[in-house]
Image: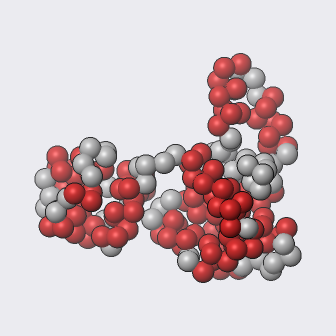
Amino acid sequence: MLIDEYIKNKKISLYKLAELSGVSYPTVYNLVNGKSDINNCALGKVLPIAKALDLSVEDLVFLCNQKYTFTLFKSEQCHLVNRMGQVEYVIEVLEDKKIDRFWRLCCYAEAMYMVAMVDYLSRLNDIPKCTNYNYIRSQKLKEKIYPIDAVIEKKLTNKNSLLKKMEKDAIPEFLAFNIVEGDVIHG
């Protein structure tokens, strides 16, 4: 869930969130940890939590409903590119301001991945780079994110050979954010 990451980035404890919102700690805990479905919660509970986090109810619901890993997110983006087409993907991401939403909600890896994807596809299709996200381009993740198969091999064999090969072959637009990504067009 992204809600727990958002709360960590805001440097607020669940106890403090319960206190600020006036919602009981068990309710806050259950929402953040996915034990309660936010869609089944009373607005009288959800609204104060959203206000305490400086979020709209819609954004709080979005964060609570995100139950995927970054690996799944990357896979979904690659499938979207293949299904929609490269140029159409770029247009949709930019028009719908998806990057802005992820960034605002402290989903930095996701926002950086989408900027990298847009930059990469723009380069491939001779589309001028969108300068709206230069503030994101000046950032990068603290630690490199590798494809899951390379991470698993490292854990099983204790060898870095696949990690190094993937890093060497990585797409520059992704590597700029410390995201090691290879072929996003063919899956």
- Decide if residue 157 is in sight here: yes
Where residue 114 appears, x then y in whole percent?
64, 63
Tell me where residue 160 sits by quadrant.
Answer: top right
Where residue 101 appears, x then y in whole percent?
50, 70
Left or right of residue 132: residue 49: left
Where residue 78 appears, x then y in whole percent?
68, 56
Where residue 151 appears, x then y in whole percent?
66, 32
Which residue occupies the foreground of this view, 78 or 154?
78
- Number of callouts in the render? 0
From the viewer's perspective, is residue 133 above or below residue 116? Answer: below
Left or right of residue 17: residue 9: right
Tell me where residue 90 sits by quadrant.
Answer: bottom right
Residue at the location (30% across, 70% down)? 57
Residue at the location (65% across, 37% down)? 148
Residue at the location (60% across, 80% down)? 95
View extreme (top): residue = 157
Residue at the location (51% across, 65% down)? 102
- Decide if residue 135 is in sight here: no
Q: How is the image coloured?
A: secondary structure
Tell me where residue 140 sits by quadrant.
Answer: bottom right
Which residue occupies the foreground of this view, 35 or 171?
35
From the viewer's perspective, is residue 149 above or below residue 173? Answer: above
